[in-house]
Image (cartoon, rainbow, N blue to C red):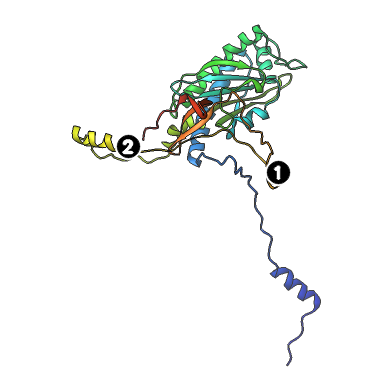
Amino acid sequence: MAEQALSPEELKALMDDGAAKPRTGSVVDYDFAHPTRLTREQSRALKRANEGAAAAMASDLLAVLRAPVPLALSGITEVGFAGLRSSLPSPTVILVIAAPPLIERGLLVIEAKLAFGLIDRLLGGPGKPPAQLRGLTGLERGLLDGLVKKLLERLAAAWKEIQPFTPAVESVAMEPAEVDAIPSGETLVCATFAAPAEGDFAGGELQFCLPYVAIEPALARLGKPVRFAAAKVQPTPEQRKSIDQVLGRATLEVRVELGTATLTIGEILAMAPGDVIVLDQGPKDLMPGTIGGKQRLMGRAGRIGRKLGVVVERVMPIAKK
């Protein structure tokens, strides 16, 4: 007995069932120019620390302003200083922070509407910023300084277990283009905090940023298992002399990065002799220098006779292992 042929409808159903199902999933953006350096464990540790800072800062603001400001951590991000600076609107309150024992400077960035809202609440108002945002007056700057001091104290306390530092405001700017205390190519680790708008209170964001190179040694210790170290044997004077002689003759390559630029594929393909590439760095920016492949100095370009040279402005500390 011959097998019964399938109907067109049955054939179509079989073909539909056997068709390859389209793959589903989220697409994640990846910046090849600025690859992510933080590990998952490091990001978690920074998130925990800054969540505590957000709660402490909100508590301080409530005590000072006599009104709740529910500050919350929005996220931990890595961003180049040039990218951060270009993304900030004008005006924005930008405080350059000295953070000894760290050599590098940090930033506290406060959205203008949030800064004016906090000042208005401090004066007994509802927290409403002016219709036209502008620079701070001397009086407003003095009022904001008191709040900033408390915020920095809370941030330093939260970071104490990761990287201790003593923050102090070094300078204040309202125009992003005026800030040049950090090299344009420097990667910053930023904690972003947000205060939601409520009624007349405009809310806004503030960011606390530290250069990655400044906290890299501390971050490297996060998540590492504790090991028992073997007893160290000190070398004899003869051995030390021999070691010093060998190390004294060793050579290391020193490189200084003049600057960086981002070009489209079309611009690269159309490149020709005589074209001028505009770098992200400004003429006053410090240039990062590496020794043996690791960033160890910041300097400025100059001339020594007929040759180019670099004046060393800052030397990075060697990370202790």
Q: Name the residue: 59% across, 19% down.
A: 95
Q: Nearer the viewer, residue 232 or 249?
A: 249
Quadrant where the image shows the N terminus: bottom right
Residue furthest out toward the bottom? 1
Q: Residue furthest front?
A: 306
Task: Name the quadrant of the C terminus.
Answer: top left
| Residue ID for mark 1 | 267
Report which quarter residue 224 is drawn in. top left
Residue 178 visible from this viewpoint: yes
The x, y position of residue 196, in whole percent, is 67, 26
Quadrant in the picture for residue 160: top left
What is the distance, in whole Å, between disc 2 and disc 1 at their CAs?
A: 45 Å
Q: Nearer the viewer, residue 294 or 130?
A: 294
- Judging from the image, what secondary structure is the residue with disc 1 in? helix
Q: Give the image location of residue 291, x and y in percent.
A: 44, 35
Find residue 249 and name its label.
Answer: 2
210 left or right, relative to 241: right
